[in-house]
Image: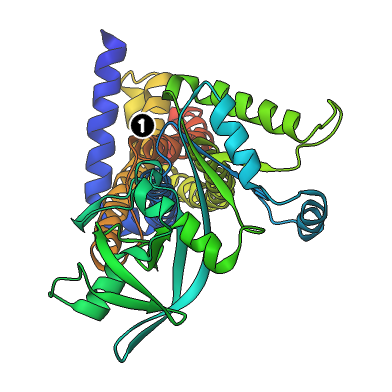
Amino acid sequence: MQSNASFGEAVVGALASLRGSKLRSFLTLLGIILATTTLIAVMSVIDGMNVYVAQNVTSMGADGFRVRKIIMMGVWDPKKYLEMQRRNPELSREEYDFLRENAKLVDEIGMSVSRTVAVNFGKERRENVQLQGVTANEGVLSDIEADDGRFLTDLDDRQRGMVAVIGNDLKNQFFGSANAIGKRITVEGLPFEVVGVAKPKGSVFGNSRDNFLMIPIESYFTIYGSRTGIGYDLEAAGPNVLQQAEDETRVLLRAYRHLRPNQTDTFGMVSSDSLVDVFHQLTGAIAATAVGVVSVFMVVGGVVIMNIMLAVVTERTHEIGIRKSVGARRVDILNQFLVESSMLSATGGLIGILLAWGVALLVKSFTPVPMHIPVSAVIVGVTLSAAVGLFFGIYPARRAAGLDPIEALRMER
């Protein structure tokens, strides 16, 4: 009970000391405030970007994956890319048919190929549009729905129809608020009838996802050929069998290509989970670097707190002598200064959290950068700042507790 009372008195005394020297306390805490604000702001941007990427960057869904000639994950390696370019053959229509007939853990498998083109409607022209040749199930595989009209069909594919589904960017530029269905646009001199307008998907990091048009893949092959650029888009029978479906697809492709067990895959595979994992590894490295840099500022702030607390001990030497002469124990004096330094530092951490929250709101409101303050960042910020105050307050507290009461009383106030 006595120790609880002593601790309570230490808290009250610490609060009184902080209120009594507001300017000095603020200047002492400036380093801790800035360090905590920076730490939480960086972690908020990273966490927000992780959430943003998981929700927006990939349209594969939780049970989708892709097969491409080359897929590079992580750090760009030109040498490795050139090696894969030389080693990996193009994916073919025959391999697609083989997968479609033999894959048992896949619900949907589609084929797609793309290139950049210019699109015209009357006198209007739009450059750098992504033209995609797709199978009729690509809407399901890439989570694309028709906002107006319809999506492509198997009949369009079989008849090599000159029809197209356009993205929202083309619709807005060419037709505005008018109906686009039934209109004819021109792609590199060839006319296509618009049969559908896709629902807007917005942009990712400033890059629009609505600057495209889709045509039947057989129409694409008729115009551009089928020798290069083919990719397979697959959907597993469920998220719980995604890994097994990827393994099955890999085994089938390796068997079709007669690869020996010791030979490397001559194709690339990727799922949404693997993309998100790679991004998390990147942001995790950034977060670790940020924590290291901020820790240096925390140490500097801790040294400032220690110096200030040493000055406080000198100022209150006479008071310490009086307290000891009326029965205050060594541990009581120790607690008083430890609590004061910890509260001083933790207060700086709390102010830093409030500032970081304000910065997050401003950034989220006025920029496209995603911000999301994780609870873990708040806990780390307060805990780290309090720990810094506790650690750097030990020496001043021990010095105060070790003062001789007689010598302390001789000090002038």
Q: Is residue 146 above or below residue 319?
A: below
x and y percent of residue 345 in the render? 38, 43
Residue at 44% from the left image edge and 48% from the top image edge? 135
- Camera-side residue: 308 or 54? 54
Q: Quadrant of residue 150?
A: bottom left
**Disc 1 target residue:** 339
Q: Is residue 143 above or below residue 103?
A: below
68 and 81: which is toward the camera: 68
User: Residue lying farthest top?
Assistant: 1
Residue furthest to the bottom in view is 123
Residue at image position (66%, 47%) is: 91
Element type where label 1 sits in the image? helix
Q: Residue at x 41, y 62 (%)?
A: 205
Observer able to see residue 8: yes
Q: Residue at position x 29%, y 19% from top?
A: 6
Would you place residue 150 above or below residue 332 in this image?
below
Regarding residue 403, the answer to whether it shows in the image is no
Residue 197 picture quarter: bottom left
Looking at the image, is 124 positioned above or below residue 194?
below
Q: Is residue 138 left or right of residue 175?
A: right
Question: Quick one: 12 or 201, which is closer to the camera?
Answer: 201
| Residue 328 spot, x, y in % from top left | 34, 21
Q: Residues within 10 Å of mark 1 (few under 14, many from 20)?
A: many
Of all residues shown, which one is farthest toward the front?
159
Under mark 1, the amino acid is Val
